Image (tube, grey):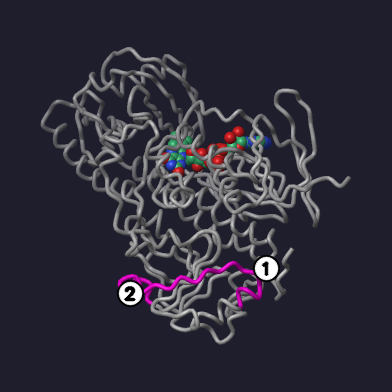
């Protein structure tokens, strides 16, 4: 009997592997996810679910699960800069509780606070509920090989030690910063492998708020005479806190007594607390030189390792998963062209590099305060120093707290599968995002008269928006898509404000919600356009193209 070949083998059941499995399953694609642990989270890392990730959660039907996670929605999300919790406050950025914040006009969603120990289970349940997804916990990738037809993975059961082979069409390493998949594929990382050696400590103290007068806040950044030295984050809005000793580029280990003393220094007094876990880790600034080698791909932390300052790591990784998922589906279903999968690197690697750089910039800004020996002195000079540092730091840190541009403004400039329309690229700014339907960008959100978002129209296949356009006018493109087996829905809209936002009569939106093409009329050669967006032929002016024209390969 012939061995069953798994279409996609996903290595790693962190948030990115779970999102990829869920999205592939949502598309009806068979995949197997292996995870070496049982999935328990001992020390939650991420807690900011960005606005774009929430838009994907909207498509997956997960918004209410995130909104009803146990993180208290009225817990103030302030960021405070201070000498200690019982010491001087230098500055503060006020944010209401997540439940009290309205979505910005550019999105139907808002960013959420949902720590990893709450968010991973939501993604896990989503993935596990898909019929075509098989989840195998306590199963470790040991090694794999690939040839032109398939990948053969050797995996080990963590309980029994039994090994087995899993043959697969494709393997995707979502196996984190120390990715074995990446190593086996021979992909190198570029950048700085050690920005800081940091120590994170989760401690429990239900009465911490009663020990000081600063009130509820999400993040506290402590600035001492030596400069910025530590942070405390409200990890569950109740009794658990994450203390982070930022450290430096020199490796240093701390004893439990040193850690306890540092926590008491940050709080500014003696108090009782329980240390739940200690995690020394290395803050990196790395991006993989490519996200693909043959039948192997990497996504998430396996592809980019960045400072958590900004909360971009997982959110960038989930963007990778969404970009890769529809391309794998298209290829497996036969309507994706030979070069479609290569476009994963061309589109996502620059986004990874951009977000890694922004995260490092946030770290540098946070650490740029420098030494101020008198900052905690109860003297007029100390007060003057605090006022100056507080003013400058508060202004500088805004770039980290307001990041709509990072989350919504990334674009696939020069993508081989987007057809440029000659319009000028808007500036790529971290703080602000101006909606645009320019090819390569996220198709903008607008509320439809029936109460849906435009984003609700996109997802499973391509969508052709036609503003005051008839099906007859769209027919050449619909016919070309049919000829190639590319799933395309025509959605006529008679909504002038949305037409003004999209700026053209037609906009072709990809399954990941990015605009592939727009124009006031269908192209003279509609087959050529369809072949470009499915990665089968080169678009005009794309010198880096490697693929050759190919016909549809419907399985
Ligand atoms: C303190 C801190 C705070 C952060 N806050 C945020 C935030 O607010 N927002 C945000 O977006 N990001 C944040 N991040 C970053 C975020 O946590 C990571 O980017 C994210 O967890 C990466 O997800 P991943 O699935 O790619 O990798 P991981 O979460 O590292 O998951 C990889 C998985 O692969 C498994 N695995 C590894 N090797 C194998 C193998 N051989 N076989 C089988 N399984 C294997 C591992 O067990 C693991 O479960 C933060 C990071 C830190 C350190």
Q: What element carries label 2?
A: helix
Query: From which residue to which does the magenta span run?
Result: 480-503
Residue 232 can be seen, yes or no: no
Single out the residue that lies furthest toward the right.
1
The residue identified by callout 1 is 337
Location of the N terminus by quadrant is: top right
What residue lies at 27% left-to-right and 49% top-to-bottom? 102
Instruction: Compare marks 2 and 1 and give the one earlier in the sequence.
Output: 1
> Callout 1: few (<14), some (14-19), or many (20+) C-alpha neighbours within 10 Å?
many
Asked whether, in this view, residue 345 is left or right of residue 103, the answer is right
Query: In the displayed structure, does residue 362 sit left or right of residue 15?
Result: left
- Seen in the picture, residue 115 relative to 534 is either above or below; the reply is above
Q: Is 47 on the left or on the right of 161, as rendered?
A: left
Residue 481 sits inside the magenta stretch: yes
- Depth check: 262 or 376 in front? 262
Q: Is residue 204 above or below residue 340?
A: above
Percent across and percent down for residue 66 are 41, 40
Above or below, 305 against 252 in this view is: below
Query: In this orientation, which residue lies closer to the viewer: 423 or 459?
Result: 459
Q: Can the viewer see residue 29 in this picture?
A: yes
Q: Name the residue under label 2.
A: 500
């Amino acid at each position: 009997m012939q061995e069953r070949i798994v279409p996609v083998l996903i290595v790693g059941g962190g948030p990115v592997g779970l999102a990829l499995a869920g999205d592939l399953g949502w598309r009806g694609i068979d995949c197997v996810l292996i995870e070496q642990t049982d999935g328990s989270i001992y020390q939650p890392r991420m807690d900011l679910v960005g606005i774009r990730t929430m838009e994907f959660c909207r498509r997956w039907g997960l918004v209410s699960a995130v909104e009803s996670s146990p993180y208290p929605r009225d817990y103030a999300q302030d960021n405070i800069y201070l000498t200690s919790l019982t010491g001087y406050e230098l500055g503060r950025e006020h944010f209401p509780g997540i439940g009290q914040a309205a979505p910005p006009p550019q999105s139907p969603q808002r960013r959420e606070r949902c720590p990893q120990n709450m968010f991973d289970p939501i993604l896990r349940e989503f993935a596990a509920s898909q019929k075509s997804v098989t989840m195998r916990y306590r199963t470790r990738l040991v090694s794999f090989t690939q040839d032109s037809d398939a990948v053969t993975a050797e995996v080990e059961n963590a309980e029994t030690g039994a090994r087995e082979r899993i043959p697969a069409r494709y393997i995707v390493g979502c196996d984190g910063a120390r990715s074995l998949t990446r190593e086996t594929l021979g992909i190198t990382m570029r950048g700085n492998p050690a920005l800081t050696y940091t120590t994170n400590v989760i401690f429990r103290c239900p009465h911490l708020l009663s020990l000081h007068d600063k009130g509820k806040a999400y993040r506290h950044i402590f600035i001492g005479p030596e400069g910025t030295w530590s942070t405390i984050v409200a990890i569950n809005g109740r009794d658990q806190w994450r203390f982070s000793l930022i450290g430096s580029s020199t490796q240093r280990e701390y004893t439990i007594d040193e850690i306890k003393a540092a926590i008491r220094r940050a709080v500014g007094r003696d108090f009782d607390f329980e240390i739940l876990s200690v995690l020394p880790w290395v803050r990196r600034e790395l991006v993989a030189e490519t996200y693909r080698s043959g039948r192997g791909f990497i996504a998430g932390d396996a592809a980019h390792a960045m400072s958590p300052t900004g909360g971009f790591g997982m959110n960038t990784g989930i963007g990778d998963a969404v970009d890769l998922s529809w391309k794998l589906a298209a290829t497996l279903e036969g309507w994706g062209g030979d070069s479609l999968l290569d476009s994963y690197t061309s589109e996502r690697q620059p986004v990874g590099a951009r977000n890694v750089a922004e995260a490092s910039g946030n770290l540098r800004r946070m650490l740029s305060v420098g030494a101020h020996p008198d900052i905690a002195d109860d003297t007029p000079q100390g007060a003057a120093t605090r006022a100056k540092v507080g003013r400058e730091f508060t202004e500088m840190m805004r770039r980290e707290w307001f990041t709509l541009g990072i989350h919504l403004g990334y674009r696939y400039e020069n993508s081989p599968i987007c057809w440029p329309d000659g319009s000028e690229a808007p500036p790529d700014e971290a703080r602000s995002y101006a909606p645009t339907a320019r090819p390569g960008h996220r198709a903008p959100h607008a509320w439809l008269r029936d109460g849906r978002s435009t984003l609700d129209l996109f997802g499973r296949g391509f969508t052709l928006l036609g503003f005051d356009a008839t099906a007859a006018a769209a027919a050449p493109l619909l016919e070309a898509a049919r000829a190639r087996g590319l799933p395309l829905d025509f959605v006529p809209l008679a909504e002038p404000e949305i037409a003004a936002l999209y700026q053209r009569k037609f906009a072709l939106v990809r399954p990941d919600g990015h605009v592939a093409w727009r124009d006031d009329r269908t192209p003279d050669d509609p087959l050529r356009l369809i072949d470009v967006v499915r990665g089968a032929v080169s678009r005009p002016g794309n010198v880096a193209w490697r693929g050759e024209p190919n016909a549809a390969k419907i399985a």
